[in-house]
Amino acid sequence: MTNAKAETAITPTRADNYADWYLEVIKAADLAETSSVKGCMVIKPWGYGLWENMQRALDGMFKVNGYANAYFPLFIPVSLLEKEAAHVEGFAKECAVVTHHRLEARNGKLVPAGELEEPLVVRPTSETIIGESFAKWVQSYRDLPLRINQWANIVRWEMRTRMFLRTTEFLWQEGHSALATAQDVDAEAMQMLGVYADFTENWMAIPVIRGEKTEGERFPGAIRTYCIEAMMQDHKALQAGTSHNLGQNFARAAGIQFQDEKGALGHAWTMSFGMSTRMIGAAIMTHSDDDGLVCPPKVAPHQVVIIPVIQKPEVRQQVLDWCTQLKRDIEAQSFAGAPVRVHLDARDVQGSKKVWDWIKKGAPIRLEVGPKDIEKDAVFMGRRDRKPRDKQSVARGEFLAGVPATLQSIHDALLERASAFRAEHTRNIDSRDEFYAWFTPPATRNPNDPTPIHGGFAMTHFSGDPALEAQIKDELGVTVRCIPFAPDEPGTCPFTGRPSAKRVVWAKSY
Amino acid sequence: MTNAKAETAITPTRADNYADWYLEVIKAADLAETSSVKGCMVIKPWGYGLWENMQRALDGMFKVNGYANAYFPLFIPVSLLEKEAAHVEGFAKECAVVTHHRLEARNGKLVPAGELEEPLVVRPTSETIIGESFAKWVQSYRDLPLRINQWANIVRWEMRTRMFLRTTEFLWQEGHSALATAQDVDAEAMQMLGVYADFTENWMAIPVIRGEKTEGERFPGAIRTYCIEAMMQDHKALQAGTSHNLGQNFARAAGIQFQDEKGALGHAWTMSFGMSTRMIGAAIMTHSDDDGLVCPPKVAPHQVVIIPVIQKPEVRQQVLDWCTQLKRDIEAQSFAGAPVRVHLDARDVQGSKKVWDWIKKGAPIRLEVGPKDIEKDAVFMGRRDRKPRDKQSVARGEFLAGVPATLQSIHDALLERASAFRAEHTRNIDSRDEFYAWFTPPATRNPNDPTPIHGGFAMTHFSGDPALEAQIKDELGVTVRCIPFAPDEPGTCPFTGRPSAKRVVWAKSY
């Protein structure tokens, strides 16, 4: 599909083919590319810059919550993974297995040699290997709570991969803690879900619904999984972060025991939580438009880009000097706890090409500066949350004083737009027929689109029957994304007619 | 060996058994521990805290030098690794090989299943996989220089491992760049070696010798390897960082080609450089003593530790309040470009135990604060570069104003001490006999010590014969650590009687 009519930087547009649009945005913004290793991507500097800023914000939040960073082995012996039955069941089907420790030339070909006595799995998550350390570190109630976070790469052998959303290798953080009681561990899981929701809304500008997963969607080995769910522009849900109350399952498997204040020995209660580079995919699909990426200002690698517009070579140095001083003055401003990140694009290419490059990369604020602007002591400003041609001249001093407020206003506009979008495509549904119709895409849509767009989130009462949930998943590809944290509001399940305590969120999902 | 006589926190002492002392320091400082995965360690919060501060400093230096961070796949297809012949030859003997992508239950046992068409190697370094991307990113001279850095985990299947120094998995950064000319690439390799030397001396307080490796010690596939070498307290050398001029070898293997300004097509010139968690081992073996770790102040996780000394419960709150305010006031000071990192140890354990805990962990400044200190408006200060009992009362205001200077003075003292130590154990040697005697440990040393201590660094003229170098390595376990960057100073090789341009550094090494 091409899009000859519209003047957009990205072809196809979202309306034409959302899945292809997503890949084109990644390409146009130079975020990442595929590699020769199946399902593994290369995260390019602009994409990694987003991740670095996300890391910095999250890391600070974890530290405030008492978490210290540490690092655990990449490899997990199969015998260790096996200790928690539900856990290994969940991960055995999709893990990279190391079986040899060298290569040897045989018939002119390098083949694996030096077979290991016990195969090693490349970590698909680290509960088991971290549990082994926790068992050594925890002896007494004085050692609790124990709160550890790890920034690491993870491998899950996915059959169908999609950049950022589902890749064989991805980057993440995983927090793990051990606590003394059932109450403490559940409170900790809720607390860290709150941190995720705060980060996702206040740093990524993505509104989320907080809730609990149903049994079928729980983390393998957990007794409760909490999650935050966001709506993408194609009306699908994306799970943006999870925290798991693991009860005593992993403590029993790993032998994490402690003596309480009275000297009694018991198992600790553990929990874990993780957020990954998938969040970059969520940001793309929440904010970006038919002109490319829109970076949430707080994590944008460059928050302001200065584009010198130089027609005549003789003014080049003067314009560059003025822009260099402007850059310094903007950097002296602070936003979201750090100096404003400014880039001066001094490349020797046409001004209009530069402008479109930065639109596609989603820089929150663009400043075009030519001799006329300098004469007026002004900048020509474009905001990425507005149309490309919606630009205005702003006096230099006024712009400078307002940089933090402008960035905050872009953040607010993105969050508000996404919230309104979600509200528009969320409906309370009370009949089975309406539910099925909601998830059936209109026939009028582009027949070439492999992922035609349906209604959105359906909020229905639900009696909680796992077999019914499986049947709906089978028929519509729709699942319960979460049971929201909300006061009970009793009603009737439209599928079974049975009573239900509150509405749940149904959606197609990534 | 025990050490009943001396009053030291670490047993054995360095003089008793250096190798065991090293492991005991790691344990006493709670830096890391072994795991159930052969050769892989768990880096605990105090050790990882050091690494985080090292990362922050290095990352800033790389960015100043034009490097952007990115991330490349963990896995390298064997066919890609094979493209550079010397490179694969160097790494094939010690790499973890992934051959399957799931586990399957067979006879009640989980076994590898889903064999891969092509085995994947867990990256032992990333020249080949990054080269593949560079070939896509570089088209024209305008794309050069291209400078990329990656923070990643690395796997090399070492047979004999030693915490931090040589582990199967380790953490590192690897910088990679592509440049237009032979001159540019060599200058870049020298430039980044300079960054390493700057970091090692000015952040880690470890003096280094900069130089070039001989042919036998070069990185597999490089045309030149530059290195910085440090002397440990057992007189052995430790290679603290390397940069490699790869010439056009990897560009040819990966097809990194560009059109120059005249339109001619040619291969780029590439280089790489890496520094790893091994540097933590270097810091331990350079600065620490028989009481435990000594953290270089600029990278210490806590630079100042406040230890409330509370004998009577009724003063507890008053002392804690005073210490909390003190903590805030110290944090308002800045050192090495960041707020001073302060920890208030409010644990409910004896003051003297806390003091020894922080001596063993190597916190640069300890402050003991009890009711009498508060009365005097003073702190009782211990510096980790001095004896544990060498403490002094300092007026609060005076201490506060002097925090940055005190930390800098500890840094200077460590660097100076290490430099003096190296000078003391380095000798210009001009005869073969003296050389052999230098590397033969005295018979009077502890016979139980597995690594008896010899002379140190020998600076000799050397005619450069690889066979002779191999013979000396065979007979003494000694190699040329580097050919220092120093003006030529012609002389005669004591081994061959042939002329030599300058002295080289010989040493036993880690």
Image (cartoon, coloured by chain):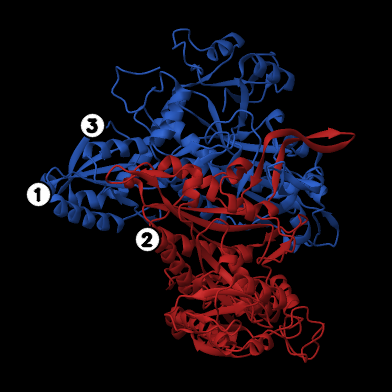
Chain colours: A blue, B red
Quote the CA–CA distance across marks 1 and 2.
43 Å
Q: Is residue B82 left or right of residue B264?
A: right
- Count the numbered circles shown: 3
Mark 2 lies on residue: B183
* Residue at mark 2 to residue at mark 3: CA–CA distance: 45 Å
Q: Which quadrant of the figure contains the N terminus of chain B?
A: bottom right
Amino acid type of the residue that numbered disc 2 sits on in the rendered structure: Gln
Dot 1 alpha-carbon crowd within 10 angstroms: few under 14, some 14 to 19, many 20 or more: few
Q: Is residue B317 visible?
A: no
The span from disc 1 to disc 3 (Cα, nearest Å) is 22 Å
Q: Position of residue A192 (x, y in %)?
A: 60, 47
Which three-letter amino acid code belongs to the residue tagged 1? Answer: Glu
* Residue B36 visible in rendering: yes
Residue at image position (32%, 28%) is A9
Q: Answer few, some or many: residues within 10 Å of disc 2's Cα (few below 14, many 20 plus, some between 14 and 19).
A: few
| Residue at x 47% of width, y 16% of height | A449
Q: Are marks 2 and 3 in contact (CB under 8 Å)?
A: no
The residue under the point 22% across, 39% down is A350
Percent of width and height locating residue A122? 69, 45
Around disc 3, counting alpha carbons within 10 Å, would you say few (fewer than 14), some (14 to 19), or many (20 or more)? few
Q: Quadrant of residue A78?
A: top right
Residue occupied by mark 1: A375
Q: Secondary structure at mark 1?
A: helix
Horizontally, residue B188 falls left or right of residue B427, namely left
Front tag of 1 and 2 = 2
Tell me: residue B7, above or below residue B297: below
Residue contact at pointers 1 and 3, CB within 8 angstroms? no
